[in-house]
Amino acid sequence: MYELLAAGLVNVAQWKYLLPLFLGTLAGVIGGALPGVTITMTIIVVLPFTFGLDPLQGLAAMTGVYVGGSAGGLVTAVLLGIPGTPSAIATTFDGHPMAKKGEPGRAIWLGIWASFFGGLLGGLFLILATGPLARFALQFGPWEFFSLFVLALSMVAGLVESSLLKGLLAGAFGLIVTVLGSDPILGSPRLTLGLDALEGGVQFLPVLIGVFAFAQIMADVEKMRGAERVGDAVIRATTLAVAQGKVVWEILSRPFLLLWSSFIGVLIGVLPAIGGSAANIMAYDQAKKFSKHPERFGKGTPEGIIASESSNNANVGGSLVTIMAFGIPGDAVTAVMLGALTIHGIQSGPLFIAQNTQLAYGIFAAYLIAHPLMVLIMGVGARWMVRVVSVPKAALFPVVLVLCTVGAYALNNTMTNVHVLAAFGVVGYAMVKFGFPLAPFILGVILGDEIERNLVRAIMTDADPWLFVTRPISGALLALSVASIAAALWQHWRHQKRVASAEDAADF
C-alpha cells in the first residue's frame, strides 16, 4: 500500500497532474469564498473543462475543488460574518467575533491550519479504510445493495428537521424521475410521454445542475435589493499577518479537540448525503459541550474555529471513502465526481481500487497534495479574495448560468440536456419555494436506477422476498433504515412539543 501511495504521489507531482490540481484548488477556494456559489456550483462549473482530460487529471482537478472549497468558505465567514459555503456556518460563530476584536489574521489562520490538519486526518482514514470497506462491500449481493441504497435515502430524508413528510416525498419524487425512459434491465421504453428525447432516460447531471445551480441563482435573484457590495472595512483597517508557529501551536496544543472534531467530520462524511454543514455544526456543538469554558463560545474563542474547520475538511475524506468503496455519492460534490467517472467509462464501487489501482492511489495522492496547495493559495490570496465577493451578483450570475448551460450541453452535445436543466431548474426553484428539501430529491435521482436494478436482479436470482430480511447484512441495513425513520419521527415529535411549550409559555 505504501509503495502504491508513494508512486501515486510521484505521479501526481508531475506538471500534467499538478497543474489541474492547483487550478481546481484555486477555483474551489474562490468558489467557497463566494457566498451563495457553494462548492457544488463550483465543481459543476469546472466539470466541462475536465472532459478532454484523462481520468486522473479530471479527478485531481475536482478533488482540488472539493478541498479548496471546504476551506475557502472560512474567508468570508471570518471577515464578513457570511459563510461562503454551508459547511462554514459554525465558523462564523467565533471567527467573526475574533475578527471584530481586531484579530482577523489569527481567526483566518486558525481556520486554515485547522482545515489542513483535519483534512490530513481525513486523508489518513481515506487511505486506510477504503480498501477494507471495499472488501467488505464485495460480500454484498443485490439484496445488500438494495438495502444500502434504501438506508441512504431514509437517512437523508430523516435529517430534514422542518418536515419529515416533505423529505420522504422529495426522495420519492427523485425516484420517479429515474423511471422516465427505459427499463434499466430489459431496456424497454416506459413513461416517455411520447417524447423521443426521453427514450434514453434523464441524465442526472443536468438535473443536478438545474436543481442546485439554476434554482439557487433564481432564489438569490429574488432576494436582490439594490447595491450588493459588501463592505471590507475589516480588511482595510487591519493586517492579516500573524506568527504562524504560534497559531499552529494553538491547534496542536488541543489534540483531543482536533482529533475528535476530525473524527466527527469523517463519520458524517461516510454517511451518505449528510454533508459538511452537519459535520461543521455537530463538531462545534461537541467542542462546546466538552469545553471547560463553554461561556466563551460565540465570543471569539479559538476552540470554535478549530472544531468547525477541522471537521468540514475531514468530511471530504469521509465522502470520498463512500464513493470509492460503495459507489454511493456522499454528497452533491461526490455525485458530480461520480458522473465524471461514468463519463470516462469507470465504474466506482467495491472493485474500483482493484480494477483502477493507479487511478485510486492517484486520487489519494491528489487529496493529500491539495492541502498544502490550499494553504499556499489561502496564504497568498486571502487578502484579495474578499474583494472578489464584492462583485455584484448581477454580473456574476449570468456568467455562472452560461457556464452551467455549456456544461449541460457538453455532456453529449445535445440540446436535450439543456432543456432538462431548464425544466429541473424550475422544479428545484418550486421545491425551494414550497419548503421541499433538495438533498433527498437529488439522492433519489442518483440512486433510483441502482435501487431498481438491484431489486430486479435480486428477484430474478431468487423470488423469495424474505431474503431481503433474512440475509444478515441486508436485514441489518433495513433495520437501520427503519430505526433512522423512527428516530426522525421521535425527534420531530420532540421538536413540535418544544415549540408548543414555548408558545404556551409566551402566551403567559
Image: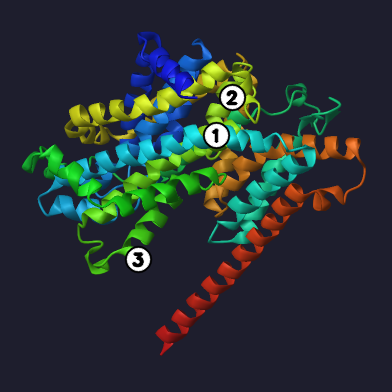
Sequence-earlier tag: 1 or 3: 1
Is residue 232 left or right of 331 when viewed as pictured?
left
Amino acid type, label 1: Thr
| Sequence-first disc among 3 and 2 | 3
Q: Earlier in the sequence, mark 1 or mark 2?
A: 1
Q: Gap between marks 1 and 2, in whole Å?
A: 9 Å
| Residue beneath the point at 61% across and 52% down | 155
Colour style of the rendered protein structure: rainbow
Q: In what quadrant of the picture does the C terminus appear?
A: bottom left
Which residue is at the front of the view, 263 or 494? 263
Label 3 or label 2, whichever lies nearer to me, is: 2
Q: Residue at x 53, y 40 (%)?
A: 331
Q: Residues within 10 Å of mark 1 (few under 14, many from 20)?
A: many
Mark 1 falls on what kind of element?
Answer: helix
Q: Which residue lies at the image location 12% right of the left edge and 44% below the top edge?
A: 233
Label 2 sits on residue: 353
Is 326 displayed left or right of 406 in the figure?
right
From this view, report whether residue 255 is shown above or below residue 372.
below
The quarter of the displayed image where residue 146 is located: top right
| Mark 1 vs 2: CB contact within 8 A | yes
Secondary element at tag 3: helix
- Mark number, residue 130: 1
In percent of width and height, residue 503 lies at 46, 80
Image spot of residue 189 (x, y percent): 84, 27
Q: Secondary structure at mark 2?
A: helix
Q: Are marks 1 and 3 in contact (CB under 8 Å)?
A: no
Using the image, tell me which numbered label, if any, was put on residue 289.
3
Q: Please provide percent x and percent y for residue 288.
A: 32, 63
Which amino acid type is marked by label 3?
A: Lys
User: Could you say which disc has been placed on residue 142 in the image?
Assistant: none
Quadrant of the rendered image containing residue 463: top right
